[in-house]
Image (cartoon, helix red, strand yellow):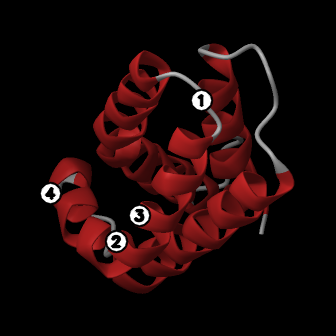
Amino acid sequence: MRLGMKLVVAALILGGCATGQRPSPSAASAEKVWGDCVVAAVIRMDDGRTDPLSLAHGIAPQCAVAHNEWSEAMIKENSTPQGQDAARERVNSSEIQFITSAIHIHRSKKHGNKP
């Protein structure tokens, strides 16, 4: 699942931006579970015509448990309350962006384009 790996890599990069560190193995594992959920939902639900943003909002609740577990793992990576607040904002504000990116990558691959 190359799409899932690209989603995970994008999330890892974003997650590490604030701390300058890689996420712990538990955070990376939670992130993979969420990425796999998103990829499976995109493959299952994308008809190629629905607006990607609308579709992303439909997919998000289906993967909410996995996203919450990843969010909590990323928040715990920060030791200060300010760092935790920043991580919370970052992971919550990026959820729809990641899902929308997964949709665009999926559509691009369906048309034979390299993402």
**Residue reaching furthest to the front:** 80
- Judging depth in this view, the residue of 108 and 4 nearest the camera is 4
For label 2, count other residues whose C-alpha is less than 10 Å away and answer few (under 14), some (14-19) or many (20+).
Answer: some
The residue pinned by badge 1 equals: 78
Query: Which label belongs to residue 28?
Result: none
Question: On the image, which quarter does residue 33 sit in?
Answer: bottom right
For the residues labelled 3 and 4, the Cα–Cα distance comes to 20 Å
The three-letter amino acid code for the residue at tag 1 is Asn
For the residues labelled 1 and 3, the Cα–Cα distance comes to 16 Å
Q: Is residue 105 visible?
A: yes
The three-letter amino acid code for the residue at tag 4 is Ser
The residue pinned by badge 3 equals: 68
The residue pinned by badge 4 equals: 54
Asked if residue 62 is positioned above or below residue 17 in the image, the reply reads below
For the residues labelled 1 and 4, the Cα–Cα distance comes to 32 Å
Mark 2 / mark 4, whichever is N-terminal: 4
The image shows residue 82 at horizontal and vertical percentages of 40, 17
| Left or right position of 26 against 93 | right
Mark 2 / mark 1, whichever is N-terminal: 2
The three-letter amino acid code for the residue at tag 3 is Asn
The residue pinned by badge 2 equals: 64
Q: Residue at image x 81%, y 46%? A: 24
